[in-house]
Image (cartoon, rainbow, N blue to C red):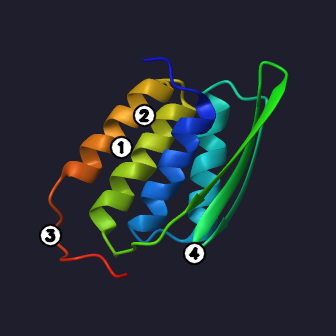
Amino acid sequence: MNSSPLEALLALGEAMLSAGAEPYRTEEAIERAGAGFGCASVQAFVTPPGLFITAQSAGAFDTGVRRVRARALDVTRITHLNALARSAARGEIGPDACLSEIARLRARVTDYGAPLE
C-alpha cells in the first residue's frame, strides 16, 4: 500500500473526532503527524461535525474534507490516537502504518457503549 499523507491525516482526524477529542487537540495532532510524514505545510480546520485539511507535499497542495456523523467519548482511543500522532511526528511511522493502526483501533471493542448519533 502506498497511502498519501493526506489520506492518513484525514483518517486520523476523523478517528479522533469520532472518539470525542476536542477540535483544537485534533488540529494539533494532524499538524504534528503531517510534519512527520514530510509535509512542508499542513493546515487543519476542525469543527465537531467535520474537518478540512490542506497538506503540501512534493510541491503540490492536496485538500480533503471529512464529515463525522457518529461520535462517542472514548478516552482510551483518544489516548492511543494521540500516541499515534506523536509517533508519526517523530518519523517512526508513515502514512500506511498510521492507517493500519487506525483500522486496528476502530475494530477494537469499546468499553464505553454505543456511539451517539
Give the residue number, with chain letter if any, for mark 1: 102
The amino acid sitting under disc 3 is Asp
Horizontally, residue 110 falls left or right of residue 48, namely left
- To which quarter of the image does residue 23 belong? bottom right
The amino acid sitting under disc 4 is Pro
Give the residue number, with chain letter if any, for mark 2: 98
| Crowd band around label 3 with a 10 angstrom C-alpha radius: few (<14), some (14–19), many (20+) | few
In the rendered image, residue 67, in percent from the top left (x then y), is placed at 56, 64
Pointers 2 and 1 in contact (CB under 8 A)?
yes
Question: Which is nearer the N-term, disc 4 or disc 1?
Answer: 4
Question: Which is nearer the N-term, disc 2 or disc 4?
Answer: 4
Query: What whole-number distance in Å separates the C-alpha atoms at marks 1 and 3?
Result: 17 Å
Question: Which is nearer the N-term, disc 1 or disc 3?
Answer: 1
Query: What whole-number distance in Å separates the C-alpha atoms at marks 2 and 3?
Result: 23 Å
Query: What whole-number distance in Å separates the C-alpha atoms at marks 2 and 1?
Result: 6 Å
Question: Which residue is drawn at the image coordinates 21% and 50% (left, top)?
Answer: 107
Q: Could you tell me which secondary element the residue under label 3 belongs to?
A: loop
Question: Which residue is drawn at the image coordinates 57% and 63% (left, top)?
Answer: 25
Give the residue number, with chain letter if any, for mark 3: 111
Give the residue number, with chain letter if any, for mark 4: 48
